[in-house]
């Protein structure tokens, strides 16, 4: 519990609109949801894209809020028909999302300042990289001569604190600031030395990690995604760059290196982020190291960490990793070139923090993978069934290129087929729908277009846009539209034969699907298992 005065001391500028003494107002929780307000709660209101939560101030007051922060003046609120209680402390700020983050961090006594804190951003590979880092840091704590504490991780899949999983219910984004700070506080209290925070563009743009003091900022890649939120690629890159700006703004911690980790293979974002780092370096005295990683190639120079002699196999990947201190072998059960990039990002972060190569090797080798990322579903069938989160044109292309190498032959020597099942989310980036259709039409042998969180959009319109892209590269008899996702997966499974690959893309780890304004329980894994079992028990298709 903290006094309101103490919390407000961390906000850069504000106007206090009551005559009460903020030192006497005690705050036990900070929330932005009026339904969660109870006595000793600081309620923070803002103007969102769809909702102005200032209108919930009366509700928060009635529920016993101790104070309210907002961006509207009392006069503006009165013009909206919102009358402030004369005894309720009301604080006007320029940016209430930032105020929410700062107050939440102050309430928990800025927990990230007690740990080595790593932020990972990017379009694809964030969750896998965060989970790889968790495995490496676990290996470090287990092999150290002296105990080095536990590991805490916040991803869009779940939160782990000292190995224990906390079900977060997140839906593909960074949790809001109070949840981030609460989880970081739990990590601190559990004795964690390392905290890894997956930082989405939404989370960065909406100040959800604004009060986290980062020591390492890393990026996987920046490709076509979330233009519905950001409007343009330049704005999307700028949102990702906020993580690196936060790194420079964070105070240095004694004995903990500070480093920015960039993907040199991602040429567009690499140059843009280098420019941001140069700008920040000119404005800050404390130094931040910059390390780049990538796949070694002829003519490519200047890589701090590089993968050489890569051996891709159906059951894993092996390569030599060259770094500024030498080289060592890497072996992982992950497959595909994109996972080489994720491993390189992980290794670069770990090396920048001074971890030994043997620890990095052990953590990467023992990492089993992430739910819904190239996850194999085995019910004894003679073909490969996969669930993967690929939901952007680039991630879908990478996934299909990876799976293409794993297609085999049937008993008669006929080449197997790559069968892709996917949709595209409603109320999100519209341009990627046709692009994803083009990718599948070009790289898959058969495409099944289906639903994926249509929300309030017409599913038929979304499917038509995807189908138009597919038809640019595929014949009419090589794709089908099956609106119901369970039926679509069943269709793909039923048509598969020995040597084929059936892959469901777009949902991955998610456990719900949105129709209208309602989230319904959903699991691609459960749907795939059900389809495989149905095929086996009913023998609808006889493999030739």
Image (cartoon, rainbow, N blue to C red):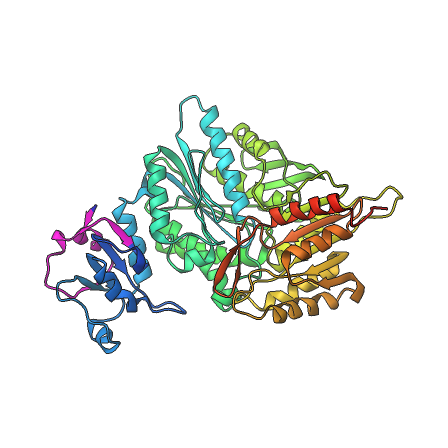
Residue shown at 50% from the left, 38% from the top: 133
- Foreground: 225 or 146? 225
Q: Which quadrant does the N terminus fall into? A: top left
The location of residue 421, given as percent across then percent down, is 68, 56
Work out whether residue 497 can be spotted.
yes
Q: Where is residue 408 shown, x and y percent of the image?
A: 80, 44
Up/down of 42 relative to 117, above or below? below
Total label count? Answer: 0
On screen, residue 438 versus residue 287, left or right, reads right
- Residue 474 location (% of width, % of height): 77, 64
Question: Magenta includes 10?
Answer: yes
Q: Residue furthest right?
A: 412
Residue, x 31% and y 42% (percent of image)?
Answer: 111
Q: Please tell me in which quadrant of the rendered image residue 67 appears.
A: bottom left
Say which residue appears at 75% left-offset and 62% top-offset: 479
Q: Nearer the viewer, residue 538 or 313?
A: 538
Q: Which residues are magenta?
A: 2-30
Q: From the viewer's perspective, tell me whether residue 344 is left or right of residue 213.
A: right
Look at the image and tell me whether residue 355 can be seen: no
- Residue 513 coordinates in the image, percent (x, y): 54, 57
Left or right for 511, reference 253: right
The residue sitting at 73% across, 62% down in the picture is: 441
In the image, residue 508 above or below residue 20:
above
- The question of residue 328 being in magenta is answered with no
Looking at this view, name the residue that lies furthest to the front.
538
The residue lying furthest to the bottom in this view is 79
């Amino acid at each position: 519990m903290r006094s309101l005065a103490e919390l407000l001391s961390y906000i850069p500028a504000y106007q206090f609109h009551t005559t009460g003494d903020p030192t006497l107002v005690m705050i036990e929780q900070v929330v932005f949801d009026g339904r969660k307000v109870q006595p000793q709660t600081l309620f923070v209101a803002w103007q969102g894209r769809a909702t102005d939560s200032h209108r919930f101030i009366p509700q928060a007051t009635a529920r016993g809020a101790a104070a309210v922060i907002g961006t509207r003046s009392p006069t503006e609120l009165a013009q909206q028909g919102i009358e402030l209680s004369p005894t309720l402390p009301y604080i006007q700020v320029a940016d209430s999302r930032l105020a929410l983050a700062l107050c939440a961090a102050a309430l928990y006594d800025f927990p990230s300042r007690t740990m080595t804190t790593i932020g990972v951003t990017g379009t694809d590979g964030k969750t896998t990289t965060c989970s790889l880092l968790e495995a490496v840091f676990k290996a470090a704590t287990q092999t150290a001569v002296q105990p080095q504490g536990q590991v805490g991780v916040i991803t869009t899949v779940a939160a782990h604190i000292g190995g224990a999983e906390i079900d977060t219910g997140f839906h593909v984004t960074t949790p809001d600031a109070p949840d981030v700070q609460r989880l970081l506080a739990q990590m601190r209290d559990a004795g964690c030395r390392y905290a890894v925070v997956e930082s989405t563009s939404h989370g960065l743009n909406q100040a959800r990690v604004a009060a986290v003091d980062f020591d390492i900022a890393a990026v996987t890649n920046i490709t076509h995604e979330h233009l519905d939120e950001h409007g343009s690629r330049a704005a999307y890159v700028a949102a990702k760059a906020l993580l690196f700006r936060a790194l420079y703004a964070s105070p240095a911690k004694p004995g903990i290196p500070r480093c920015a980790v960039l993907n040199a293979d991602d040429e567009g974002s690499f140059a843009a982020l280098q420019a941001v780092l140069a700008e920040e370096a000119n404005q800050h005295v404390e130094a931040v190291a910059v390390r780049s990683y990538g796949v070694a190639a002829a003519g490519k120079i200047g890589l701090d960490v590089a993968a050489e002699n890569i051996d891709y196999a159906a059951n894993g990947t092996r390569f030599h990793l060259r770094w500024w201190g030498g080289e060592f072998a890497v072996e992982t059960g992950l497959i595909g070139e994109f996972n080489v990039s994720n491993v390189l990002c992980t290794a670069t972060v770990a090396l920048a923090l001074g971890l030994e190569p043997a620890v990095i090797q052990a953590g990467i080798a023992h990492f089993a993978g992430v739910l819904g990322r190239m996850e194999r579903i085995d019910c004894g069938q003679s073909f490969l069934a996969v669930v993967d989160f690929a939901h952007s044109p680039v991630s879908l292309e990478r996934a299909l290129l990876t799976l293409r190498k794993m297609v085999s032959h049937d008993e008669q020597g006929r080449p197997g087929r790559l069968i892709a099942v996917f949709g595209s989310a409603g109320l999100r980036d519209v341009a990627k729908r046709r692009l994803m259709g083009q990718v599948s039409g070009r790289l898959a042998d058969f495409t099944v277009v289906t639903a994926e969180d249509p929300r309030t959009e017409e599913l038929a319109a979304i499917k038509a846009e995807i189908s138009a892209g597919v038809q640019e590269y595929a014949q009419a008899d090589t794709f089908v539209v099956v609106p119901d996702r369970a039926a679509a997966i069943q269709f793909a499974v039923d048509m598969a034969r020995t040597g084929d690959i059936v892959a469901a893309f777009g949902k991955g780890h998610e456990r719900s699907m949105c129709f209208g304004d309602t989230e319904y329980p959903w699991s691609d894994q459960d749907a795939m298992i059900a389809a495989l079992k149905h095929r086996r028990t009913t023998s609808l298709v006889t493999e030739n």
